Image: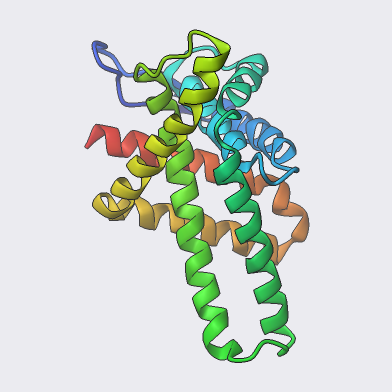
Amino acid sequence: MSIMDSTTPASGQSEPSPVNRFALFSETLLAGLLVLVLSIPLVTIPAAFAAGIAHLERHLAGRDDSLRGLWGTFRSALPGSWKLGLTTAGAAVVIVLNLLLATVGQLPGSAVVLPATLIMAAAGVVLLLRTAAAWSDVHRSGVPWSDVDGEESSAPRTWSAALGTAKALSLRDWTGSLLLAAALFASVVFVWMLVALFVVVPGMLILASAAVKMRTNRA
């Protein structure tokens, strides 16, 4: 079996881009590790995942996939992402506390709260991944970034537009949303089997997000 595969050709291209599966595997692990490091402050999670997904998109398209490019994308995505980042960090803290309290039986109504928390957490992660994947397209769509003031004022609108796109896609392309939920479930199972595998979770999620995005664009 060949280790080479092909991605969907971009607009104006007659031939699909060949992809080395081993190279994609290593690039996914490396990008995922960097996304994990960039996500440590928690409020930077949206920007980190946006940079990771865009990095894998460039790799699959045969464009610049250097680490400098990933860092540059992260810096571009960071302005305007603070509101979503704070919401993500706050939601993560609440979800972890709910799960811990429900597990030890200290949360009233845990029989209802626990499954509700898991469902809301999965839906939130899918929406976050959709938003991070949509950011790069919105960013390239012509939002002005000519000066510092313009950058600061347009960055929140970029993320707001990406969030709106993600909400619409999550409902319209429900199959893709289920695929992302499946990737999240697989990640949880891996960590449950061996806690040390948490380092590969960001890579799995950004690869799934990039793949779902390419599938949606192809449809």
Answer with the quarter of the image where residue 139 lies: top left
Asked if residue 180 shows in the view, the reply is yes
Rendered-image quadrant of the N terminus: top left
The residue lying at 48 percent from left, 8 percent from top is 146
The residue lying toward the viewer, choosing from 214 and 90, is 90
Q: Position of residue 116 (x, y in %)?
A: 50, 77
The residue lying at 56 percent from left, 36 percent from top is 81
Q: Position of residue 10 (x, y in %)?
A: 30, 18
90, above or below 75, in the image: below
Left/right placement of residue 24 relative to residue 161 reads right
Left/right placement of residue 13 relative to residue 21 reads left
Q: Position of residue 99 (x, y in %)?
A: 66, 75
Question: Farthest residue toward the right?
Answer: 196
Left/right placement of residue 20 relative to residue 26 reads left
The residue lying at 30 percent from left, 20 percent from top is 9
The residue lying toward the viewer, choosing from 89 and 195, is 89
Asked if residue 1 shows in the view, the reply is no
The residue lying at 71 percent from left, 52 percent from top is 198
Q: Position of residue 40 (x, y in %)?
A: 75, 43
Which coloring applies here?
rainbow
206, above or below 57, in the image: below
The residue lying toward the viewer, choosing from 81 and 148, is 148
